[in-house]
């Protein structure tokens, strides 16, 4: 802390106490490449032992660092090598058994979530991938802390529409199997285009095969800090000044986050990985991305101008954060999950924000359509079309996009779904019901755009 003067320390304390600044997650990234074997039970035992070996002190040490610096660390998490890859060598592969073993290990070490029950199928399926997809719903329905993700496309490979269709089926089955728990399995599952290998946020965190043996990745957050800074500006301050203000606050948030991350990595005796600059909201009042839009001058999220406001926010956060750390990674920008943001929920309930507007906003945000509840009887092909549109935005724009959507069984437009905790609650949103069956059922692989040939 010797590099911080008294004024900076007081500002940081105010950001924590008044404006909800926190470390949203510390995520231990752990490679399981050495755990593969020809036996499911042997592989599971190796995975369990390795998680305990590297993660046994994660929660305890994170709590110590939190108390030392008085900066809240909201979640402690683990990200693993995609399990579809690790388990594929097993002659008797049972991915549900691996999932339950991983979940047991997560409970044992006390983390909040564990990710990496994942598959990378942007170009096609292996035999193991096909088995993996079949078992995702049962795996998520029979575990509590496990999170799952699949990558369906990239800007280099195009989009695997066969996988998009299978993903829609997975989502509907997840919803049905956990219908008595607000279809919670869907909240633990996300599909990507251009998934990143060092993302510390769930449900999409996994340890890429190009990642080191282990590393500590940090996700910082501070929507309340940003909105407060903008509210303190003169109402006539132009958008250039607004952007500069966001940059300065992002610098301070990132500096605080990197300090915590490096101290914890040092205590765990593992390498510091990356800091993800993403502004992740919570259902708590004053911790909302939508409230930043209001501070900028919009009546509600979704009002004309919202996409520009989000683009400015995303870009300014990155510009400010990159000056505070040499190791920025993950997704970095601004998340717009509906259920996890009190201001976004309000905008949906008032009719300002629709799925179509959210889709437009995903062209400039960190990820994509996130934590959106839709009617439980929505057709699989409609869900596949929503996913395909989002994958297209990612593919064409060379950015990460994602879909985490919840068909709430037994719920209709106007109803609400309660998840609790950081997941919040979601108003059920209307979807476009015009028929797309013939189009999405053509399946196959969508070729990569021309700009993919840029070697």
Image (cartoon, helix red, strand yellow):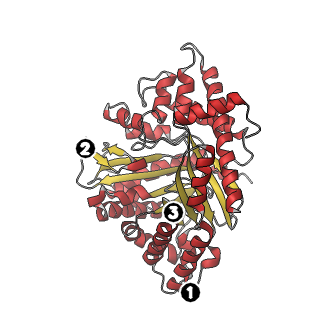
At numbered mark 3, what does the secondary structure look like: helix, strand or loop? strand
The first of marks 2 and 1 along the sequence is 1
Q: CA distance from mark 2 to mark 3?
A: 30 Å
> Which residue is at 39% across, 52% downward?
405
Quarter of the image with the N terminus is top right
Q: CA distance from mark 2 to mark 1?
A: 48 Å
> Which residue is at 34% across, 48% downward?
373
The first of marks 1 and 3 along the sequence is 1
Residue 77 in the image, given as x and y percentages of width and height: 54, 59
Say which of 111 and 316 sits in front: 111
**Residue occupied by mark 3:** 114
Given the current orientation, which residue lies at the most extreme right position? Answer: 3
Q: Which mark is residue 415?
A: 2
Q: CA distance from mark 1 to mark 3?
A: 24 Å
Q: Are marks 2 and 3 in contact (CB under 8 Å)?
A: no
- Label 2: how many Cα within 10 Å (few below 14, some 14–19, many 20+): some
The first of marks 2 and 3 along the sequence is 3
Residue 130 in the image, given as x and y percentages of width and height: 47, 73
**Residue occupied by mark 1:** 38
Against 403, residue 106 (above or below) is: below
Residue 142 horizontal side relative to residue 245, left or right? left
Residue 187 in the image, given as x and y percentages of width and height: 40, 55
Say which of 394 and 343 sits in front: 343
At numbered mark 1, what does the secondary structure look like: helix, strand or loop? loop
> Which residue is at 49% across, 60% downward?
113
Against 124, residue 95 (above or below) is: below
- Looking at the image, is mark 1 or mark 3 nearer the viewer? 3
């Amino acid at each position: 802390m010797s590099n911080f003067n008294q004024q900076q320390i007081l500002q940081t304390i105010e950001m924590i106490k008044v404006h909800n600044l926190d470390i949203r997650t510390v995520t231990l990234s752990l490679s399981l490449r050495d755990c593969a074997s020809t036996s499911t039970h042997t592989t599971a035992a190796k995975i369990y032992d390795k998680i305990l070996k590297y993660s046994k002190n994660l929660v305890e040490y994170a709590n110590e660092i939190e108390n030392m610096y008085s900066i809240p660390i909201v979640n402690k998490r683990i990200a693993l090598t995609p399990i579809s890859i690790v388990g594929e060598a097993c002659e008797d592969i049972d991915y549900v058994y691996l999932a339950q073993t991983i979940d047991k290990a997560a409970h044992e070490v006390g983390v909040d979530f564990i990710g990496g029950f994942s598959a990378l199928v942007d170009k096609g399926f292996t035999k193991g991938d096909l088995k993996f997809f079949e078992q995702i719903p049962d795996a998520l329905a029979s575990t509590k802390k496990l999170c799952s993700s699949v990558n369906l496309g990239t800007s280099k490979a195009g989009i695997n529409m066969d996988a998009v269709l299978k993903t829609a089926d997975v989502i509907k089955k997840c919803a049905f199997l956990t219908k008595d728990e607000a279809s919670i399995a869907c909240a633990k599952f996300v599909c990507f285009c251009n998934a990143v290998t060092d993302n510390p946020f769930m449900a999409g965190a996994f340890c890429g095969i190009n990642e080191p043996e282990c590393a500590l990745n940090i996700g910082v957050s501070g929507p309340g800090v940003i909105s407060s800074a903008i509210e303190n500006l003169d109402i006539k301050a132009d958008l250039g000044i607004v952007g500069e203000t966001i940059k300065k606050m992002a610098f301070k948030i990132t500096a605080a986050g990197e300090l915590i991350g490096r101290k914890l990595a040092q205590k765990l005796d593992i390498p510091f990985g990356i800091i993800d600059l993403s502004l992740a909201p919570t259902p708590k009042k004053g911790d909302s991305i939508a409230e930043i839009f209001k501070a900028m001058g919009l009546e509600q999220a979704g009002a004309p101008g919202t996409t520009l406001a989000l683009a400015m926010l995303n870009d300014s956060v990155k510009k400010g954060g990159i000056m505070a750390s040499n190791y920025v990674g993950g997704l970095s920008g601004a998340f717009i999950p509906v259920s996890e943001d009190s201001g976004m929920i309000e905008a949906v309930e008032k009719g300002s924000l629709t799925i179509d507007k959210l889709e437009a906003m995903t062209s400039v945000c960190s990820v994509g359509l996130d934590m959106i509840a839709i009617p439980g009887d929505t057709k699989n092909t409609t869900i596949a079309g929503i996913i395909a549109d989002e994958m297209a935005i990612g593919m064409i724009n060379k950015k990460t996009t994602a879909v985490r959507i919840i068909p709430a069984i037994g719920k209709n437009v106007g109803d609400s779904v309660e998840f609790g905790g950081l997941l919040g609650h979601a108003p059920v949103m209307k979807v476009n019901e015009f028929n797309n069956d013939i189009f999405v059922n053509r399946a196959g692989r969508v070729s990569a755009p021309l700009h993919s040939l840029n070697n």
